[in-house]
Image: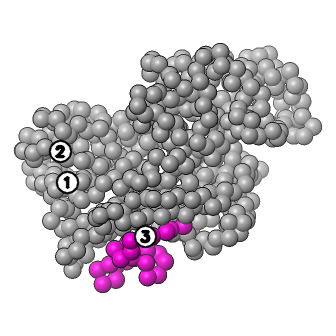
């Protein structure tokens, strides 16, 4: 889609398609996942249908899943963009899709792909699709959350069930505790299948630092070009599984004197009803992969499975294993009435690809607690790797109850405090709601609080975590602002039938 307006209507990128004028819309979407160990693509068709005054996602068909590529590296240990680009181009050919035919999608970078030089080179591969793809650089927190959603663990964690998802990749493992349809705790640990890699002759071609430390702890002296004996590989896998299991139970495992944790340890101490495994190693855990890729994956899978069995927790199959990631994005447009918005200064617009956060602000309470509002915002920023403040964010705040001065003031004070790091980087306060207090909250922040920040406060939208929004410049003809909403799509089917966007209002 595009924010270009023709005669007051907002059109999709495919010429002649308008969200306002159609009862059913089919869009092509691509999900691209580029990580430290593997890279792959997923092509999908997504159908949006009109339901009263809104659109819902009613069908989602994955029509091509690419091969899994071991992410290629150059001699300087950066990602080989030329080889990666050739792989991506070949997958488009196999999918029988031209890049120009893609309506929307998501580019997810994790691990070493996030590093500045790698991210820039990868972005160049998708330069022609800039604006169509939501680009997400996922650190440990966000990668853990996305794996929990992509594996289906979040969907399974309903009706009182608590699910632990363990995403075991090549370099790290991510652990998420899911309850009530959300991630309630998480951590990440330096345990992975490709910490030590060998060639077909069993000679070591790659050793990560944590792999070297595991070897040293076991009294092994591993070196590039040297052999990795079968008994050494078995011992490494067993020790890694032991440390991973410690992290799953809330400990802070070490190898030698070094901590293996990349985040705070799991604080959750309640019951775990079931465990799911995702990531590359899951293909061996569930017997879907029998090959050998020169790493510790098969041995690590056996060790992990044995420990979970001994723990006595049911080991369930995830919706997706190695492909537990974003499969694309849906994209749609709405217009927000000028009577429900506040923008100051007007020059702050347009804003593009702003991630939405949906903290539990408890706005239905009779008295709003500003400290709780601030803490909830900070907690979500941390969980989604946005706490550094380098990116603007949009807070979805579904207002409930009366808009008295005291309630508005407590809410706005909490918002400003919670966004401290974001505002310190010069980004605006962006508030989005589903009610009719957008104008009031914007005015309160600027006029009553005299806050020296740019403010964009709009109403009439229903948003959720993993939505991204573009807010266009105000349309002179209507006093409204066009909003493009891009929702990341995960393999689990829970999102089908959920409201995604209001129709544009007509005069």
Would you identify the image quadrant in which residue 289 lies? top right
Q: Is residue 386 placed above or below 8 in the rendered structure? A: above
Say which residue label 1 marks: 435
Q: Is residue 326 placed above or below 286 in the rendered structure? A: below
Would you identify the image quadrant in which residue 96 lies? bottom right
Does any portion of residue 383 appear in the rendered image? Answer: yes
Lower sequence index among marks 3 and 1? 3
Relative horizontal placement of residue 300, taking residue 452 as reference (left or right): right
**Mark 3 residue crowding within 10 angstroms, few (<14) / some (14–19) / many (20+):** some
Would you identify the image quadrant in which residue 459 lies? bottom left
Say which residue label 2 marks: 400
Q: Position of residue 164 (x, y in %)?
A: 53, 28
Q: Position of residue 279 (x, y in %)?
A: 64, 39
Lower sequence index among marks 3 and 2? 3
Q: Which portion, as a residue range, is magenta?
A: 1-28
Residue 19 in the magenta stretch? The answer is yes
Say which residue label 3 marks: 24
Q: Which mark is residue 461?
A: none
Relative horizontal placement of residue 506, taking residue 383 as reference (left or right): left
């Amino acid at each position: 889609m595009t924010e270009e307006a023709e005669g007051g209507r907002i059109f999709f990128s495919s010429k002649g398609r308008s969200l306002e004028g159609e009862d059913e819309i089919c869009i092509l979407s691509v999900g691209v996942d580029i990580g430290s160990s593997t890279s792959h693509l997923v092509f999908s068709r997504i159908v949006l249908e009109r339901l009263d005054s809104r659109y819902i996602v009613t069908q989602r068909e994955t029509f091509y899943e690419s091969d899994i590529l071991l992410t290629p590296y150059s001699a300087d240990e950066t990602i080989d963009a030329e080889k990666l680009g050739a792989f991506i181009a070949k997958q488009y050919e196999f999918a029988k899709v031209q890049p120009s035919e893609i309506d929307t999608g998501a580019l997810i970078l994790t691990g070493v792909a996030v590093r500045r030089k790698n991210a820039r080179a990868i972005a160049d591969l998708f330069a022609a699709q800039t604006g169509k793809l939501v680009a997400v650089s996922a650190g440990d927190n966000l990668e853990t959350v996305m794996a929990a959603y992509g594996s289906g663990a979040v969907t399974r964690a309903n009706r009182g069930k608590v699910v632990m998802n363990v995403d075991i990749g090549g370099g790290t493992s991510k652990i998420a505790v899911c309850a009530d349809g959300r991630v309630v705790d998480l951590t990440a640990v330096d345990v992975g299948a490709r910490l030590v890699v060998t060639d077909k002759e069993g000679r070591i071609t790659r050793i990560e630092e944590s792999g070297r430390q595991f070897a040293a702890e076991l009294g092994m002296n591993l070196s590039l070009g040297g052999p990795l004996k079968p008994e050494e590989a078995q011992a490494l896998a067993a020790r890694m599984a032991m440390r991973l299991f410690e992290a799953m139970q809330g400990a802070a495992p070490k190898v030698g004197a070094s901590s293996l944790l990349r985040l705070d340890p799991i604080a959750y101490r309640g019951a775990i009803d079931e465990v799911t495994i995702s990531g590359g190693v899951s293909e061996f855990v569930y017997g879907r992969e029998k090959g050998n890729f020169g790493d510790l994956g098969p041995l690590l899978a056996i060790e992990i499975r044995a420990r979970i069995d001994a723990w006595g927790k049911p080991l369930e199959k995830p919706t997706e294993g190695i492909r537990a990631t974003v499969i694309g994005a849906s994209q749609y447009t709405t217009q927000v009435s000028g009577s429900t918005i506040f923008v100051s200064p007007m020059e702050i617009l347009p804003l593009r690809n702003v991630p939405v956060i949906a903290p539990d602000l408890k706005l239905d309470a009779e008295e709003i607690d500003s400290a709780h509002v601030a803490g909830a915002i900070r907690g979500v920023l941390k969980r989604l790797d946005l706490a550094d403040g380098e990116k603007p964010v949009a807070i979805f705040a579904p207002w409930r109850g009366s808009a008295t001065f005291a309630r508005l003031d407590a809410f706005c004070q909490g918002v400003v405090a919670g966004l401290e790091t974001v505002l310190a980087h010069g980004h605006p306060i962006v508030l989005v709601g589903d009610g009719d207090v957008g104008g009031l909250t914007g005015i309160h922040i600027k006029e009553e609080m005299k806050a020296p920040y740019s403010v964009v406060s709009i109403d009439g939208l229903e948003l959720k975590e993993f939505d991204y929004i573009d807010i266009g410049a105000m349309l002179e003809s209507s006093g409204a602002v066009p909003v493009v909403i891009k929702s990341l799509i995960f393999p689990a089917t829970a999102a089908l039938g959920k409201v995604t966007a209001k129709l544009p209002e007509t005069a």
